[in-house]
Image (tube, rainbow, N blue to C red):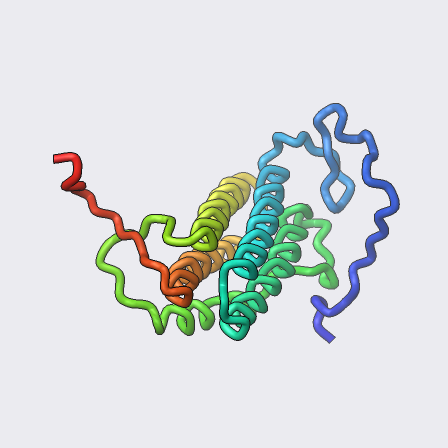
């Protein structure tokens, strides 16, 4: 059985602990870090991304008329939320505390994302300019998730320059930002909404 199939050994019976009242928090291994710490900032941004992807799912459910089409993407997005939680666990754990049984990102996750990027991109028209967010509310949510994913990637790169971090974390976030871009385009096309392209010289201002 894969490690990802194991149930987490977590019990949450109290929401507040008061340990953060002085600006501190604990890593998975129990080490105390300031909430301004680069590692805490990195996994906090991953947490933000998980929430935004939840927003993508919910707005897609409201806007998209085709149950069959939205179900295909919904399945991928929910899986990505689980994978990001696995990734966040790695970021929140010092290398010496990493246990083989802990949830983590593996190369198969990245390969699957690449296949999904190719599959969804196949039906999209070739781009000849940059895309501006808009056309539908769902599209905007996907772009918000994409930009936060890029921020999470930058935060993890900053962390990796100062402390040890599994390179698969960076690779996954990089592919996921590409996937979110492709999904943002796909959602507009599948709902027959126009795509906005950047026009570097706006004639309306002439």
> Who is closer to the viewer here, 15 or 203?
203
> Who is closer to the viewer here, 29 or 41?
41
> Who is closer to the viewer here, 157 or 47?
47
Where does the image place residue 138, in percent across and percent down from the top left? 47, 54
| Vertical position of residue 161 compared to residue 119: above or below | above
Q: Residue furthest top?
A: 22
Where residue 162 sits, quadrant-wise, is top right
Q: Is residue 139 left or right of residue 59?
A: left
Quadrant position of the N terminus in the picture: bottom right
Q: Is residue 142 left or right of residue 104?
A: left
Q: Residue furthest right?
A: 13
Where residue 177 sits, quadrant-wise, is bottom left
Q: Is residue 199 left or right of residue 187?
A: left
Q: Residue furthest left?
A: 206
Quadrant position of the C terminus in the picture: top left
Where does the image place residue 32, in percent across and percent down from the top left? 74, 34
Residue drawn 37% across and 49% down? 133
Where residue 120 sits, quadrant-wise, is bottom left
Where does the image place residue 65, in percent across and percent down from the top left? 50, 67
Residue drawn 65% across and 57% down? 86
Residue drawn 54% across and 41% down? 159
Residue drawn 48% across and 58% down? 176
> Who is closer to the viewer here, 169 or 200?
200
Q: Is residue 183 left or right of residue 45?
A: left
Regarding residue 168, the answer to whether it shows in the image is no
Where does the image place residue 15, in percent across and percent down from the top left? 82, 40
Regarding residue 64, the answer to whether it shows in the image is yes
Total marks in image: 0
Q: Residue furthest front?
A: 65
């Amino acid at each position: 059985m894969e490690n990802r199939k194991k149930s987490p050994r977590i019990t949450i019976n109290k929401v507040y602990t008061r340990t953060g009242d002085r600006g501190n928090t604990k890593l998975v291994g129990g080490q105390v870090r300031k909430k301004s710490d680069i590692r805490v900032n990195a996994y906090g941004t991953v947490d933000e991304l998980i929430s935004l992807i939840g927003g993508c799912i919910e707005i897609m459910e409201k806007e998209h008329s085709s149950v069959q089409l939205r179900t295909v993407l919904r399945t991928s997005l929910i899986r990505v939320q689980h994978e990001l939680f696995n990734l966040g666990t790695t970021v929140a754990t010092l290398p010496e505390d990493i246990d083989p049984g802990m949830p983590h990102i593996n190369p198969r996750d990245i390969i699957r994302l690449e296949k999904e990027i190719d599959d969804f991109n196949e039906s999209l028209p070739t781009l000849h300019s940059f895309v501006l967010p808009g056309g539908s509310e769902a599209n905007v949510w996907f772009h918000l998730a994409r930009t936060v994913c890029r921020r999470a990637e930058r935060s993890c790169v900053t962390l990796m320059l100062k402390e040890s971090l599994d390179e698969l974390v960076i690779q996954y976030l990089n592919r996921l930002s590409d996937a979110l871009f492709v999904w943002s385009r796909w959602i507009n096309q599948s709902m027959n909404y126009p795509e906005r392209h950047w026009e570097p010289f706006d004639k309306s201002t002439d």
